[in-house]
Amino acid sequence: MTSLPGTPDPSIPRTRARRRRALVAVLVFATLALSGCTRPLPSVSFFGNGALVSAAPTLWCSADSTAEALDCLATRSDASAPQMTLRPGQGVSVNVPAAIGLAPWVVVFRFRTAAGKQEELRSELFSSDARQQYELKPPATTDQLLRVEVQSGLTPMATATGNGVDYAALHTWVVLIVAA
């Protein structure tokens, strides 16, 4: 399109507007792409008494090469943990994502006996067998589960006495149990 001498070319503002829109679109796309680069942290599912509960990590840390310093993305107290209702003797099914199941993990649980005493136990250590599911049952049919915690990212450390080895968990997920 040609314009008369002395009149501005009408295609110039359109070109500038198009460039601005293209630049804005590129900036918006880049911002969204960069903010989406952080993978979401994995959740663990707990199923019991007909209810399914998904728990975000209560702890998610990485250790430096000497395991002397931690960098934690998530640290939550039990107050923010999801809850489920179970009767004495009822168990819970724990389901971890594949990425967690490929590394060693363990279930630590607290329960109350019929006599009212609180105790804590743990499952066997599930190592690199790609296990993703565990059925947790209280030790006795009269015991009430109170708290279930999945631990992974296990890092060896000396025991308090220095005579053995224990494991610190870098990743944890917790569900609290409300007595029915």
Image: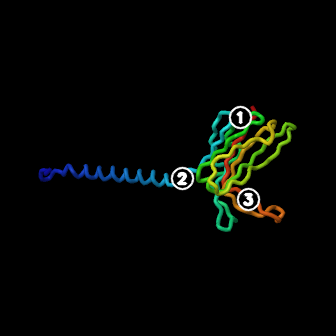
N-term mark: 2 or 1: 2
* CA–CA distance in space, label 3 to label 1: 30 Å
- Which amino acid does the dot numbered 3 rest on? Tyr
* Residue 173, x across and y down, in percent: 67, 48
Q: Are marks 3 and 2 in contact (CB under 8 Å)?
A: no
Camera-side mark, 2 or 1: 1
Q: Secondary structure at mark 1?
A: strand
Q: Secondary structure at mark 2?
A: loop
Q: Is residue 17 left or right of residue 180?
A: left
Residue 69 appears left or right of 139? left
Report x, y in % for residue 99: 59, 53
Q: Amino acid at mark 2?
A: Arg
> Which is nearer the N-term, disc 3 or disc 1?
1
Q: Residue furthest bottom?
A: 66
Q: Which mark is residue 85?
A: 1
Horizontal relation, residue 6 to residue 156: left or right: left
- The disc at residue 167 is 3
Taking depth in this image into account, of 102 and 24 the one nearest to the observer is: 102
